[in-house]
Every structure is written in structure tokens, then in C-alpha cells.
């Protein structure tokens, strides 16, 4: 009996102890779940805290960048304003340069127009080219104008004055020749003979030398020196055959016979 009672008591105790033990197991699992949840929450909070710290660090690093960008934008605006100013200055300088160049060109043209009459000029005469000063050319042409007008006395004086003033002139040969012609036209035959002979002896290759010798013969004829004229004509025919002066000399020589 006692055994039965003890067994029954044990069974009852076991029966009554089963729910308590089950509750105990359930509390442990809940506790573990709570702990795990708490751990997850703690991890999330740590992660959030870390993210916040990273964000703060990022914000702190971005702020200087923002300020740098703002400064850069300000600098860009300043540079734009400076470029605009310089563009305006450049346009003004370009305009001023164009105006200056135009003025310089006008002044240069004006100066050239004033200097041109004073510049040496190239002249072609008796088969050669040379340069003469404007005044030199003016005086020569003035003297030749006197010859063409028949003012032989004044022409001779002017040509001789020219020869003294411009002894190295390119006109020197022509002047020497026309001095003789002016003297001939003024009936200064002896002076003309001297002038033409000096011309011929000093310029034997000049294209006007045959004409100078023919003029010497003409002066001799005017002075009734037919013998001298014949000699001069023969010299001309012999020295310069084939020239127009030589042909005229042949006719003149035949007329003197």
C-alpha cells in the first residue's frame, strides 16, 4: 500500500511537474530570443551609429568641398568679368590700332607725295639709263627747252652752267653735245667746233659722236674752211661707216668738190 501510495505520489508529482518544466523551457527560449533580438538591435544601433559617424565625417569632408566649389564659382565669375573687361579693352585696342595704322598710312602717303619730287628719278637717254635728282632734271629740261625754242645764246650759257654744277651727271654727254649745237645755232662756229671736237675725242663710242663730227664739218663750211671740212667728213666716213651721219657726209663731201 505504501508502495502504491509512493508510486501514485511520484506519478502525481511527475504529472504536476511536467507543465512547470515546459514553462521553464519556454522562458529560456524566449529569453534567448530576446537576447538575440537585443543583440540584433544593438548591432543595428551600432551600425546606425557607425553610419551616422560616417555621414558626419562625409558631411565634414563635403563642407570644405562645397566651400571650395563656391570659391571656385566666385573665381570663375571674377574671371568671366575680367575676360569681358579684357575683351572690351582688346576691342578698343584693335580699334585704336586700326585708327593709328590708317593715320600712319595717310601720313606716309602724304610724306611720300611730298618726298617723291625730291627722290632720284631714272632717266633713259642716248641708250643708257641713269638716275638724276629732280632739280638736276628740271634744269636740264629747262635748258633743252631753250634749245627747242631757238634761244641758243641763253641755252649755251645754261648748259655750260649745268655742266659746272653737275659734272658727274648722267646728262653730261648730252649737255656737252648740245652746248656745241647751241653755239652753232648762235653762229659761234669756232666755239662750236671746239665743243664738238672735245665731245668726239672724249666719247668716241657715243652714238652722237658721228653727228658731232658732221657738225664740225658744217661749222668749217660756214667758216669757208672747205679743206678742213673735207678732212673732217673723210674722217667721219672712215671711222663710222654705215651711220646716217656717214651717209650725209658722203653727200656733203661730193657737194664740196
Image: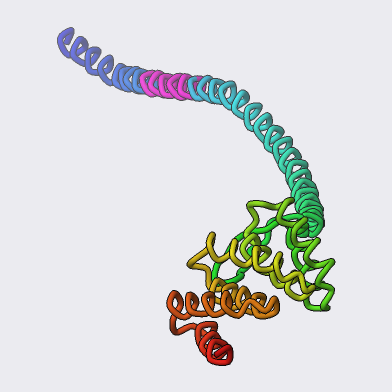
Residue 56: % across, % down: 57, 22
* Residue in front for this viewpoint, 79 or 244: 244
Q: Residue furthest top?
A: 2
The front one of 7 and 231 is: 231
Q: Work out whether residue 98 can be spotted.
A: no
Q: Residue at x 48, y 79 (%)?
A: 234
Task: Choose top left, top right, bottom left or bottom right for residue 77.
Answer: top right
Where residue 218 appears, as percent x and y from the top left, is 64, 79
Reply above or below: 189 against 68: below
Q: Give percent across and percent down for residue 203.
A: 53, 63
Quarter of the figure with the C terminus: bottom right
Task: Tell me if 89 is positioned left or right of 50 in this view.
Answer: right
Q: Residue at x 48, y 75 (%)?
A: 235
Q: Main secondary structure of the magenta part?
A: helix
Indicate the quadrant where residue 170 lies.
Answer: bottom right
Towards the viewer: 120 or 9: 120
Magenta stretch contains residue 114: no
Report whether 228 appears left or right of 135.
left
Question: Which quadrant does the N terminus fall into?
Answer: top left
Closer to the camera, 28 or 54? 54
Query: From the viewer's perspective, is residue 43 above or below residue 174?
Result: above
Q: Tell me if residue 248 can be seen.
A: yes
- Name the colour scheme: rainbow
Report which quarter residue 118 is drawn in: bottom right
Look at 60% across and 80% down and name the residue there.
226
Judge left or right: residue 91 versus residue 195: right
Q: Which residues are magenta?
A: 31-49
Amino acid at each position: 500500500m505504501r508502495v502504491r501510495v509512493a508510486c501514485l505520489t511520484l506519478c502525481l508529482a511527475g504529472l504536476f511537474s511536467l507543465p512547470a518544466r515546459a514553462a521553464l523551457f519556454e522562458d529560456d527560449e524566449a529569453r534567448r530570443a530576446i537576447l538575440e533580438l537585443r543583440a540584433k538591435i544593438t548591432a543595428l544601433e551600432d551600425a546606425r551609429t557607425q553610419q551616422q559617424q560616417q555621414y558626419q565625417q562625409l558631411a565634414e569632408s563635403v563642407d570644405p568641398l562645397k566651400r571650395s566649389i563656391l570659391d571656385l564659382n566666385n573665381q570663375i565669375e571674377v574671371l568671366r568679368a575680367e575676360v569681358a573687361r579684357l575683351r572690351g579693352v582688346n576691342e578698343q585696342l584693335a580699334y585704336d590700332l586700326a585708327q593709328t595704322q590708317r593715320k600712319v598710312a595717310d601720313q606716309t602717303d602724304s610724306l611720300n607725295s611730298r618726298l617723291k619730287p625730291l627722290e632720284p628719278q631714272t632717266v633713259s637717254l642716248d641708250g643708257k639709263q641713269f638716275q638724276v635728282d629732280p632739280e638736276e632734271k628740271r634744269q636740264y629740261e629747262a635748258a633743252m627747252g631753250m634749245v627747242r625754242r631757238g634761244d641758243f645764246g641763253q641755252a649755251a650759257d645754261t648748259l655750260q652752267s649745268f655742266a659746272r654744277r653737275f659734272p658727274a651727271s648722267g646728262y653730261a654727254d648730252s649737255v656737252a653735245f648740245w652746248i656745241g649745237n647751241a653755239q652753232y645755232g648762235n653762229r659761234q662756229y669756232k666755239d662750236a667746233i671746239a665743243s664738238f671736237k672735245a665731245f668726239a675725242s672724249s666719247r668716241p663710242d657715243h652714238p652722237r659722236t658721228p653727228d658731232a663730227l658732221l657738225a664740225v664739218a658744217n661749222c668749217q663750211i660756214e667758216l669757208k674752211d672747205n679743206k678742213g671740212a673735207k678732212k673732217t667728213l673723210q674722217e667721219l666716213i672712215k671711222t663710222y661707216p654705215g651711220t646716217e651721219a656717214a651717209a650725209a657726209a658722203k653727200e656733203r663731201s661730193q657737194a664740196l668738190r
